[in-house]
Amino acid sequence: MEQSLTLMSAHIHFVVSIRPSRPPREELGLTKPMISKVAPGVLVLISTATVSWANQHSFLNVSITPVECSIVCAKELAQQFFASSASQLPRPGVPKPDHATISSEDFVVISVEGEGLEAGQRVLELTSPLALAGISIFFITTYFSDYILVPARSRGQVVRALEERGFTFQESAEAYVNPAAHHHRNKSSTSSLGSPTTPPPRTVSELQTRTFSLLKRYEITPTVDKGVRLVQCAGRRDDPSRRSTDELGLQLGLTKCLIHHPKFLSLTLTEEEPASLLLEKRHVVDFGPDNVLLGNKDDVLIPITLDLQSLPFEATGIVCGVAGKLAGGSESGPLVCPIEMSYLSTARAGTVMVDEKDLGRAMEALQSGDFGVALH
């Protein structure tokens, strides 16, 4: 099956980035009041709809991670549901424990479907043309598809970069296709190295070297909380007669998750696909015994957090550089057994997800990039 990249027309924002001041590592996480600020808006978005609530948004992502709460949605939804809550928290630099920001940048979304490469290789395939062109991106994995978010002002540059790498635009299908690539879907998602005034790297190897040098310079340390164990799930749509019941069960489960103040939760809604969730395994029980979630709840992922707050917002190449290290190896040679990984971008952080059994190898690969890795 050919890989298809669809350029969606919706303009979206990273509307809200809410994060705590930097606490000691063992206390890392969002405070309950912070989650409470955004929970009402999220609950309204998933409970008021004249049609299926899971398919009323062109693109919506709500992510709660150990370092921030990040919401990506249409401008009008940002103003309607979140602007007031964000205004109640101080701006960055204000000596308060929590702060909020709302981006002024417009983004467009590229939806990636298809079958073929393993997860890490897929991230490299999709992000390397844009990283080498110096384009800042965010990468979000869902259960069914991957999404690349790029600044709207870079849309033309994105088109050229993809075409130069062999992707072609099919006007009838409004999709990019790489005729030479045969892929299978995997689960991958982050923000993209260097200042925009720095010339882009010429090779993926040079990009990887710059990425790790940049992270070291800004003292960005990957952090792992092995107590946070994630599963990738999705809402069901396989039985039309149960659709209303399943969506109600999904709503109730999400409501319970938010009430319990999760350490980690990522929800993605689009017009075309069922709801996609990345949630803590301990919260699967919140969705009841009726099996409203698709996915193998025994496949546990461990998140590795990169807090990118100190980097320029337009920094590029992080996702490609990190994916290259885990899935492609380094100048000393390719990995004998590439590490399956996925990546979640939030406003000012990135999260690498790896299988529980691969965590040790992932840490070793990242440490070889001169990271100091914090485990707790």
Image: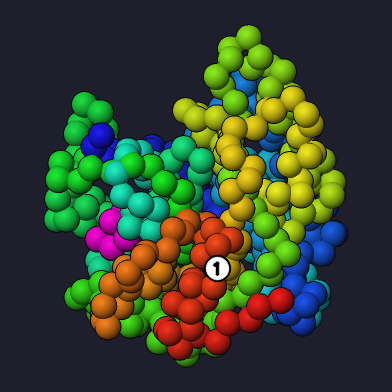
Residue at the spot 20% in from the left edge and 46% down from the top edge:
181
Q: Residue 233 falls in which quadrant of the image?
A: top right
Establish if 164 lies above or below 267: below
Judging depth in this view, the residue of 275 and 51 nearest the camera is: 275
Q: From where the camera sits, is residue 272 visible? A: yes
Residue pictured at 47% horizontal, 28% vertical: 272
**Residue type highlighted by circle 1:** Leu
Disc 1 crowd rating (10 Å Cα; few below 14, some 14-19, many 20+) is some
Task: Name the side, left or right, on which 66 lies relative to 13.
Answer: right
Residue 313, percent from left and from top:
48, 70
In the visual, does 346 lie left or right of 24? left
Residue at 26% across / 78% down in the picture? 333
The prevailing secondary structure element of the residues shown in magenta is helix
State the quadrant of the C terminus. bottom right
Q: In the rendered view, does 344 fall on the left or right side of 323?
A: right
For the point 40% across and 53% down, the residue is: 119
Is 297 part of what is drawn in magenta?
Answer: no
Magenta-span inclusion, residue 128: yes
Q: Is residue 94 above or below residue 319?
A: below
Q: Which residue is mark 1?
A: 359
The stretch in magenta equals 124-129
Q: Quadrant of the N terminus?
A: top left
